[in-house]
Image (cartoon, rainbow, N blue to C red):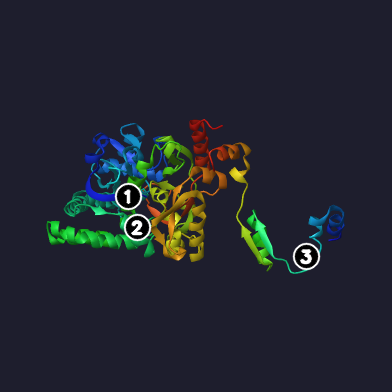
Amino acid sequence: MSGNPVWIDVLPAEKVIPVLKDKVVLHAGPPISWERMCGPLKGAIAGAIVFEKWAPDLATATEMAAGGGVTFHPNHHFGAVGPMTGITTRSMPVMVVENRTFKNRSFCTLNEGLGKVMRFGGNDQEVLNRLAWMRDVLGPDLGSAVRAAGGIELKGFIGRGLSMGDEMHQRNVACTSLILRAIAPWLARTAKDTNRLAEVLASIGANDQFFLNVAMAMGKAIMDPVKGIEGSSVVTAMCRNGTDFGIRVSATGDQWFVAPVEMPEGLYFAGYGPADANPDMGDSAIVETIGVGGFAMAASPAVAGFVGAGSASSALAFTRTMSQIVVGENPQWTIPALDFAGVPTGIDIRLVADTGIAPVINTGIAHKEAGVGQVGAGVVRAPLDCFIHAARALSNKLGVQ
Amino acid sequence: MSSVRKESAETGSVSRRSVGLLDSPVEVVNVGLEGFYQELKLAGVPVVHVSWSPPANGDPKMADILSKLGA
């Protein structure tokens, strides 16, 4: 809670994550081999390989990935996070967020918008063209603006967004608008020409989820300093790769506790249904570890409808229930509908394992086949087995049997 | 009801309190399985639900570990 995350730059990923200078693909979730990856993750990897010009087409790229021509690592191993498939490769622009209290930095790619996008497994020319524009225009221009601004402090946006109906996972309308207001003057001051400036402003303004990736980088910057506290049972990361769900716990450092991912329950876009859905995916659950997303559902009755979680009263119940599995409330981020109670913060594995209450996560739903994209949005639970495995490991580490 | 009355007469003051328990309209606090709550609610019975499950999902070894970890 004492962290002070500041968005300080946007840079090509290889500039801040040196391992990306090689043919390396970072992905969401805990470690996984190509053979066990789900369809959209494989599709996004193939698209990223073509995007980086390591292969001329998707078929060749898929052969390359299957044959060991690229190396896979989780984003989390390099201070990074990415939504859904979470693909990060060397030329993709990443936001750099510095936690000025603890001096650590985190990274997250820029949000591509909704529909057919790489984070949902999209990989056609439209997807790659958008990524190229983000690499050549959006990333560099945002970087110039953020640097000119001397950095943008982020915590205040969350407090205001909660009072305006955002929960910062599936609803970021307010925070996107607020950060656009903050950065627009700096974009104008550093603009190379007005048409290009208009493209950048229109892109952010048309993407209600632009702030999601900002919130994720902020969440990572807040939670990384929580790692390695002796005896602490607080969850420092929750993430999914479409096959496995993984958590990390403070006292056990970088160790992963893994269980099969659950299937989200939610609402589907016209023409799609549960049979089309891929299991849960993405590093975006980092926002739930800092008390927003599903944990702050009470702030966002609109999102409860969007993700099929029910009525406004159901949204209140989600947040109240999550308050039973955390170490406390964050007084800096409050929810008007709960008499300004702070968001439930700091998931405690002991409380999850003891009560059987699994953390709730608001999420997008990807099509299970590569190349299609997003088909809906919903709610999913973290698997209890992750927390039970972690509790056993913690007891072994502490010599408590 | 007759068996309740008979048993309560034989086993002391606590059981005697159940005499007449169902003679007036029932108000229920349901603990645990939500299905009972839903059925009573559908039947129009005044009922509140308390969400509860055994500690550590009924696993005594895990419950012991969690207790020692301070849960």
Q: Which residue is mark 1?
A: A218
**Circles 1 and 2: CB atoms closer than 8 Å:** yes
Question: Marks 3 and 2: CB-CB under 8 Å?
Answer: no
Query: For the residue marked with disc 2, what is the amino acid?
Result: Ile
User: Can marks 3 and 2 be said to lie on one chain?
Assistant: no
Which numbered tag is attached to residue A158? Answer: 2
The amino acid on which the numbered mark 3 sits, given as a three-letter code, is: Leu
Label 3 to label 1, Cα distance in Å? 57 Å
Residue A331 at x, y percent in the picture: 40, 56
Q: Which residue is mark 3?
A: B22
> Marks 1/2: CA distance?
10 Å
> Type of residue at label 1?
Met
Residue A236 percent location from the top left of the image: 41, 43
Q: Secondary structure at mark 3?
A: loop
**For marks 1 and 2 on the same chain, the one whose residue lies earlier in the sequence:** 2
Could you classify mark 3 by the number of other residues whose Cα lies within 10 Å: few (under 14), some (14-19), or many (20 or more)? few
